[in-house]
Amino acid sequence: MCDVLRDVFGYDSFRGDQEAIIKSVIDGDSGLVVMPTGAGKSLCYQLPALLNPGVAVVVSPLIALMADQVTALKALGVSAAAYNSMLTPRERNAVEADLRAGQLDLIYVAPERLMMDDCLRLFDEVPISLFAIDEAHCLSEWGHDFRPDYLTLGRLAQIFPDVPRLALTATADAKTRSVILDKLRIPDKQQWLGGFDRPNILYKVADKVKSFDQLMAFLSTQPRGAAGIVYCQSRNRVERVTEKLNAAGVKALPYHAGLDDDVRARNQTRFLRDDSLVMVATIAFGMGINKPDIRFVVHHDLPKSIEAYYQETGRAGRDGLSAQALLLYGAGDVMLQRRWIAESTADDAHKHVNRGRLDALINFCEATTCRRNILLGYFDDQRDQPCGHCDICLTPNSLTDMRVMAQKLLSAVIKTGQSFGITHIVDVLAGRKKEKIERFEHDKLSVFGIGKDQPDTLWRALTRHLVAHNQLVVDEQRYNALRFTEHSRTVMRGEVPVLLRSSVTEHIRRHSRNESKGDSNSENSPPYNDDVFQHLRALRKQLASQDDVPAFVIFADITLIEMATHIPKTLEEMATIKGVGTQKLKRFGAVFLNAMQEY
């Protein structure tokens, strides 16, 4: 087992529960694996597929990504194929022939294709070593990414009772895990919960003020040539942000459901194969993205839940190197999400669950203690100590009790009749002589001008905080008027603190230079010669273009960094580099050695 790990995959040792999981699968046991993205879930079924007789059937949710997964395995010398509707009749016949001849170690198939009668008959003809169900959280309608096609996989236990089933996901709370175990008939005891922490990701949340300026400030702190994803709520915003990024000199592509299938596929392929692109996308983009060197994920708008946020940010730093996640957060996002929940066709039980998930996400955004601990606590992965690697831990003692300002704000809401939105309330507090204010004689109120010493952005941040904590509510039936709730009076009476922390945006602008230097010295980012690294990246890109494969298929960033750190001089030394297995040493070892020596 260890020989295959070294010779094929280029690793000297297992991580976490990998060895125990692999041994269990080899012994024929079914199980559920919950591991953070980048922790090595795929090895848990790929290695048994090479050791056990028969073919391992990997259920993958997206056809578009199967080709790259197969290409990466073939580069390791593994016999793998995709079996889906994109194949021509000749290609499909060739895969079926290889399958029947026992020449495949792994075959990738979408759930809807697998459960077709003709496909089931085909697999019934050949020995199967394992069913690996990737992105298994899609089985649960209570999860953030439910897919009805996954429910049909429950029949696998009946049709193939002697074949082990390994469910894998990075995102599953207790309820979702229970559904997966029940549907796939996996014993409760056969669970490996590898924790949810991604210590290499720096989590940041910023008040949304001037979102594009904030995005550009953030991008300016990223490593040279870094690739990343910017998630937006709507198709129109995706297009606008993409256009503005390109105008600012940042290479960016759009991705959303409104684009032609060919355009989406082409943009996705470019992102996977280009080292330095930014993908601006709706949540239609991302599941199963097999790109290990994504250095950042930005949420331009609020995601739907902590599960969704965790899944989406988990696409950064899959190679274990330093990565960052920035979430821009505004009151408008909260109002929009609450309206969507209220207007959805879901039943009351699902609406209740979705409101609870939104509240948990708001609590994460409004955090005044370690953000990572709140995120992990949501998944019952409790930690006692602050992480030291989120925006709150990096800017301690930044809380201010704003209850006096909150009382002024609530007074203005009351005295104007709870009939006006935030813009009008801020104008009243700032003492602005606008036509609308004079028409309603709000310039004669005692609250007129009592907040002119504070910037509008602070009043808006305070309003967002009160809305998030249900101490104010936005009445969408009355032009987004601010109204009292049962909790407003406790604030008015000064009975509860109103704690706000300094803007993360300001922290990024002031400290980005120091912070980015600090990240590069973390244990996940060892010191290395960046010029050599960039030289090797350029070579990798050239070789990948020649082979028409993603760059990481040649070598991952973490492998190039280790080369740039140790500068191997012989093939024997090159063979000790993490990620350089036997096949890649034969194909690329000499080329990269020459490149380092020439440089």
Image: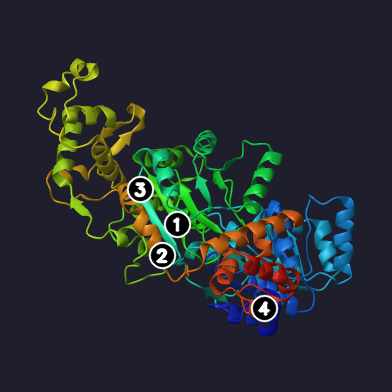
Amino acid marked by disc 2? Leu
Say whether marks 3 and 1 touch (CB < 8 Å).
no
Callout 2: helix, strand or loop?
A: helix
Placement of the C terminus among the 4 image quadrants: bottom right
Residue topped by disc 4: 570
Residue designated by label 1: 324
* Circle 3: residue type: Ala
Q: In terms of sequence position, does the residue under pointer 4 or pointer 2 come before the other?
A: 2
At label 4, which amino acid type do we have?
Thr
Label ID, residue 376: 2
Mark 3 vs mark 1: which is more N-terminal? 3
Query: Which dot, 4 or 1, sits closer to the camera?
Result: 4
Tell me the distance, in whole angstroms, between the alpha carbons under discs 4 and 3: 48 Å
| Label 2 environment density (alpha carbons within 10 Å; few <14, some 14–19, many ≥20) | some
Q: Residues within 10 Å of mark 3 (few under 14, many from 20)?
A: many
What residue do we see at 74% from left, 80% from top?
A: 51
Instruction: Reply above or below: 273 against 341.
Output: below
Q: Secondary structure at mark 4?
A: loop
Q: Name the mark nearer the viewer: 4 or 2.
A: 4
Q: Quadrant of residue 66?
A: bottom right
Q: Earlier in the sequence, mark 4 or mark 3?
A: 3
